[in-house]
Image (cartoon, helix red, strand yellow):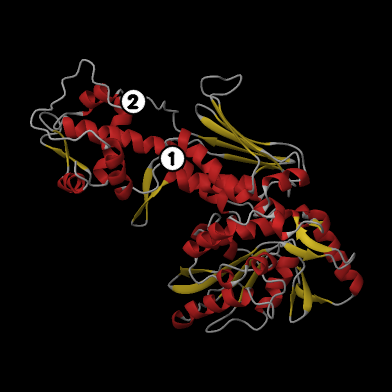
């Protein structure tokens, strides 16, 4: 969560979705009553280190990390919260004092703490002991969250078991100490909330969420035959498409296929996040793709579409709306449409937190497009996202064009066998998260500079057939990565050369 949103929440009074708790050196004794109540109602935000009237009291610096660790572990402990719901608290520093922020999504399950069900109102947390009230709560969850639908004849063998090693690798890379890593496959599904029991009917089994996340393709098509994600590129052929990807597989692999499709067709750019260079395309579209998979209403036959146009991308997916109209990214209250699926994606590291898609995308798109055009998120029975894009670039020019250009080859000992592959290998080691198209473009430019050192942008543009504007951008990326350098006077005799670092790298791969 951004500090801007933290400050905005701290200006509000406590309510059904906002709770302040003093916590100097240990977790408050009633913390899990509030967590349980918010999970059972509409979700909410909890701040530790803030008193009841919103004053920042702070958390002990020496106790903070242990408190966060304890909270994560306890949220996965059925003795504390049943069924478990792993939370991801964040540490913030305000006015020189440490506070801990806990985002609690609305859950699609009914939770207990100390074997007691809690609910939430503006007056705080309260116990529910009457069987009819508990039944009403279960019923409301079942009616709203269709991901909870139980399929009693759905068996473990109906899942794509090759996904489990991939799931564990993703979890491990996101959190090496994640408690799910020590569980068996079946137990992991249970703890993740993908197996449920209906306490009104006695029916039990794996859920729609389990089928969507892990089911074999034929199983998914039998359960939700209308399910598909249709990705299109409409830049030249506006009536049909230039390229198309039709996805009907599980959500784990759907995410990967859609990210590859985006990498194939959209350019990339990089910016500094702290002191680390990151891919803007990856940062933006990991959120966008996760959103259309995590928050879709899968019982609705409306197809999910993703259309890449010349200057924008439009995404539509069926939705169980929580409000209507255009979402204001600075004031909206995030609400998970499929909390179990969302929680699973969070554990994989594919979603940062609830609401991060709208917030992060709104901030990063401006950097990506270099324009002031804002993305739009429109809530309704069909959720619509409109993202501005940089000017669409064709992918020609991957191989250097030499007609009419004198290449300097005298004295150059450059072996041609496997050259592109070796250069690509060096570049991908130095610049992470490159898409295939951009990697080939940079490889083309490195090859051109190696055989034509000391030239300037217009000349390299003629050789490669890239526009001068694109060439300047690619040269800037290679320069900032230390692979090429400009020597001489910029306005007169200067030109581009491979850096000593790049020459050494090429020498190491026998080029």
Quadrant in the rendering for residue 153: bottom right
Residue closer to the observer: 409 or 271: 409
Residue 390 horizontal side relative to residue 56, left or right: left
Q: Position of residue 480 (x, y in %)?
A: 26, 45
The dot on residue 397 is 2
Residue pointed to by mark 1: 368
Residue farthest to the left? 411
**Label 2 crowd (10 A; few <14 / some 14-19 / many >=20):** some
Q: Position of residue 456 (x, y in %)?
A: 18, 29
Q: Earlier in the sequence, mark 2 or mark 1?
A: 1
Residue closer to the observer: 142 or 184: 184
Quadrant in the rendering for residue 304: top right
167 relative to 366, above or below: below
Marks 2, 1: nearer the viewer? 2
Q: Secondary structure at mark 2?
A: loop
Q: Position of residue 40 (x, y in %)?
A: 75, 66
Asked if disc 2 and disc 1 are in contact, CB closer than 8 Å, the reply is no
């Amino acid at each position: 969560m951004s500090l801007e949103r933290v400050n905005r929440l701290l200006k509000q009074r406590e309510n059904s979705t906002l709770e302040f708790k003093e916590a100097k050196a240990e977790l408050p004794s009633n913390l899990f009553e509030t967590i349980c109540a918010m999970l059972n109602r509409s979700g909410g935000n909890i701040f530790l280190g803030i008193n009841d009237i919103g004053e920042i009291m702070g958390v002990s610096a020496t106790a903070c990390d242990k408190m966060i660790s304890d909270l994560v572990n306890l949220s996965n402990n059925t003795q504390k919260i049943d069924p478990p719901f792993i939370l991801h608290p964040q540490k913030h520093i305000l006015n020189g004092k440490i506070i801990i922020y806990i985002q609690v999504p609305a859950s699609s399950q009914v939770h207990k703490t100390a074997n007691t069900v809690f609910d939430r109102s503006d007056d705080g947390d309260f116990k529910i002991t009457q069987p009819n009230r508990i039944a009403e709560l279960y019923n409301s969850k079942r009616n709203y969250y269709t991901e909870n639908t139980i399929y009693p004849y759905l068996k473990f063998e109906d899942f794509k078991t090759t996904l489990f090693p991939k799931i564990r690798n993703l979890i491990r890379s996101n959190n090496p100490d994640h408690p799910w890593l020590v569980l068996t496959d079946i137990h992991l599904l249970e703890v993740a909330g993908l197996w449920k029991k209906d306490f009104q009917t006695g029916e039990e089994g794996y859920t729609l969420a389990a089928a969507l996340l892990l089911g074999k393709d034929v199983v998914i098509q039998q359960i939700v035959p209308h399910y598909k994600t249709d990705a299109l590129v409409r830049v030249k052929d506006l009536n049909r498409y230039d390229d198309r990807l039709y996805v009907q597989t599980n959500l784990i692999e759907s995410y990967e296929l859609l990210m590859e499709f985006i990498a194939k067709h959209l350019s990339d750019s990089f910016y500094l996040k702290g002191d680390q260079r990151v891919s803007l395309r990856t940062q933006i579209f990991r959120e966008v793709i996760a959103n259309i998979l995590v928050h879709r209403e899968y019982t609705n036959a409306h197809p999910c579409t993703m259309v890449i146009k010349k200057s924008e991308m439009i995404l539509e997916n069926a939705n169980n709306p929580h409000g209507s109209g255009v979402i204001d990214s600075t004031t909206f209250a995030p609400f998970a449409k499929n909390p179990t699926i969302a929680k699973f994606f969070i554990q994989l590291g594919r979603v940062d937190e609830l609401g991060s898609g709208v917030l992060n995308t709104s901030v990063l798109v401006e950097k990506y497009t270099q324009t002031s055009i804002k993305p739009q998120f429109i809530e309704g029975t069909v959720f619509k996202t409109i993202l501005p894009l940089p000017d669409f670039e064709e992918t020609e020019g991957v191989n250097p064009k030499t007609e009419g250009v004198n290449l300097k080859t005298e004295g150059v000992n450059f072996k041609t066998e496997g050259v592109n592959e070796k250069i690509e290998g060096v570049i991908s080691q130095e610049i992470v998260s490159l898409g295939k198209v951009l990697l080939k473009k940079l490889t083309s430019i490195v090859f051109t500079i190696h055989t034509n050192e000391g030239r300037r942008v217009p000349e390299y543009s003629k050789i490669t057939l890239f526009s001068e504007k694109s060439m300047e951008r690619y040269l800037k990326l290679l320069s900032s990565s230390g692979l090429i350098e400009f020597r001489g006077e910029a306005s007169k005799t200067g030109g581009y050369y491979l850096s000593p670092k790049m020459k050494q790298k090429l020498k190491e791969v026998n080029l």
